[in-house]
Image: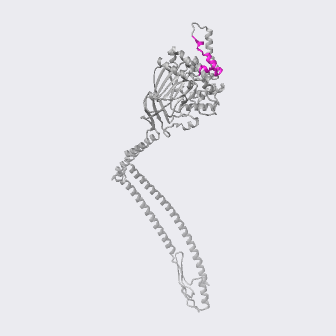
Amino acid sequence: MYPHSGRGGPYRGDREEEYIGSRYLNQQHLRAPASGSFSSRATSSDRYYPSHRIEPPVDYRERDLEDRRSTENEEDNVSFANSMEKRKSLRKLLSRFADKTAMQGVGYISSAKYWYSRAIWVFLLLVAMGWMVFHLYYLISQFTDLPVQTKISLGFNNLQFPAVTLCSMNVVKFSELQTTSVEFQSLVALTQPSRFKPEDHIPGGRKKRFVSEFDDLGNLTDYGDYYDDPSFRDEAFKDAKKDNLYEVENTFKNLYLAMPRGVRVKAGHQIQDMLLSCSFNGFKCFPVNFTLVNTPEYGNCFTIESGNFITKNPGPKTGLTLIFYTQNDEFLEGISQGYGMRLQIHEPGTFPMPDQEGIFLSSSFETHIGLRLTDITRITPPHRECNDGIEFKKVNKMQYSRSVCRIFCEQEQSLSQCGCYNHDYKEFFFFSNNTNKNRWCKTQQEIRCLANIMKEFGMQQRTCSCLNPCKEKKYSLFPSSRQWPTEAYSTILMQSLCEQFPAKCQRVVNMKTDPRSLALNFVKVTVYYEDLNYEEFVEEPEIATAQFASDVGGAVGLWIGLSVLAIFEVVQFFIELCAYGVHVWRYKQRKSKQIKKRKQRQNGYAIREEKDFANEKRYQESWNSYRHY
């Protein structure tokens, strides 16, 4: 007899188990089985086959899917609500900016009641902003062009005295002629005035011989071709004949420069032989205060400069006073064409070039030269280019100037292309202490190469980048002169000369009977500042940064009424717009991820349903087989 069994099968207990897919699982305890072999076997089977299974409702899966879809729809509704809320906040952002900003016209656009009123204000605002952009473009283009203006002012201060360079008008002393080269002596002999004295009748043959001698002067030096070759002349003067006097002077210079520097210096006039008196502001100066510079045109020149020469009061009494004995008896007749001296006043530290910038001082005259200083300060990059001279002085051992820079530039190109440089500038390389540049052009081939380079420079086919110095001093000269000395003062000068140069005394005494000849041996010059006022030229930006900012502020305020604080309002508004844009972008990213996750969940549900169906099928098969058993 079977024991009491539950509903639906021969179970001996009341254990109930309900399988509800993945949603829930409810378990009940089984009652203790009764005694009996079958019961024992049934109990053993209950471990694998529950005594009673409560099947899930038929519409369970449909309701489960509906619940999930409802949840997802709620999430979508929340996201949509958030999006609508953000859209509303954007409107609030725009409305708040329109109500609060000081920008002209925006408030009327926001508060306009009619569409055409709003359209008019929008049009006016856009036009004003367009003109503002055009105005700002004009101001910015002007500022970026970096225009420069020159400010002229009048200063007053103690002034540094300039450098003063003086040269004799005679290059080589007659007493030193025998120390020079044979070619140089031959040229001096050919130019003796006794060979060219006018006569009542000059035979035609003799006249031709004189002309021939002048024409052959260029043969004394290889530099003759540099001047005579028509291929290196300007087109306007290609067929012109050279002036004989020019040929003499040029040949003399070339022969003079062909000699070693030591010979040239020794053959020229010496400062200790010429200087009779030197004083600055009443204090004596001496020959050792002068620096020797040998030049092609004037031979030995002497420069006096000192950092201690400071002018504190204007006028001749506080200036530099010099008296020279010119040694006219040592002049080369036929070469030296006049008496006197050459003077150049230049900025301290610069290389003297008396042939380009000097003035003449007449013998038997006292010359006063009043000075007025012009101090020039040029603007530095990025506005303009100028040379501060630091690197130039480090390389060439002399202060920068455009003239000196051009000379070095030309000779650098000559040295690189021809292997030599123009001997006119030997002294520049001597003072630069550059022993690698000690080769000057000598052969015809080198001279022709040099002439070709000089021609290219003259035609501007070659150029040099020599900028203006950033700081420069210019001196305006106001000379005046008078006849000097008097006959009485000539006697005093003669006595002073005899004391200093006893060897010259007898010759000067012989001139005592001819006061005119005696006076021609003396030159007096006084250099001084006329006034301690000086002109100052300073280059500065035409549009300063503060002025540019003011112009920009005026343009913005003129067209749309913005101040600095109002500009920050606009900046804050754009920052908030950017923040809103970032938020929208993030929202779209999150939305995309949600859609992707939803698709993944849907795919997971389908897989899970398939698994549930397979499990249920296996369970049903097991149950059916058990019932059968």
Q: Is residue 570 visible?
A: yes
Q: Is residue 243 visible?
A: no
Kindly report the secondary structure that dominates the magenta region of the rendered protein. Answer: helix
Residue 588 is situated, as x and y percent measured from the top left of the image, at: 48, 60
Q: Is residue 220 left or right of residue 488?
A: right
What colouring does the structure picture have? one colour
The region drawn magenta spans 172-197
- The part of the image, by quadrant, that contains residue 449 is top right
Q: Quadrant of the N terminus?
A: bottom right
**Is residue 113 shown in magenta?**
no
**580, 176: nearer the viewer:** 176
- Above or below residue 81? Residue 47 is below
Q: At x 47% / y 41%, what residue is drawn?
A: 144
Q: Quadrant of the C terminus?
A: bottom right
Q: Is residue 155 left or right of residue 466?
A: left
**5, 576: nearer the viewer:** 576
Residue 224 is situated, as x and y percent measured from the top left of the image, at: 63, 21
**Is residue 176 shown in magenta?**
yes
Q: Residue furthest top?
A: 201
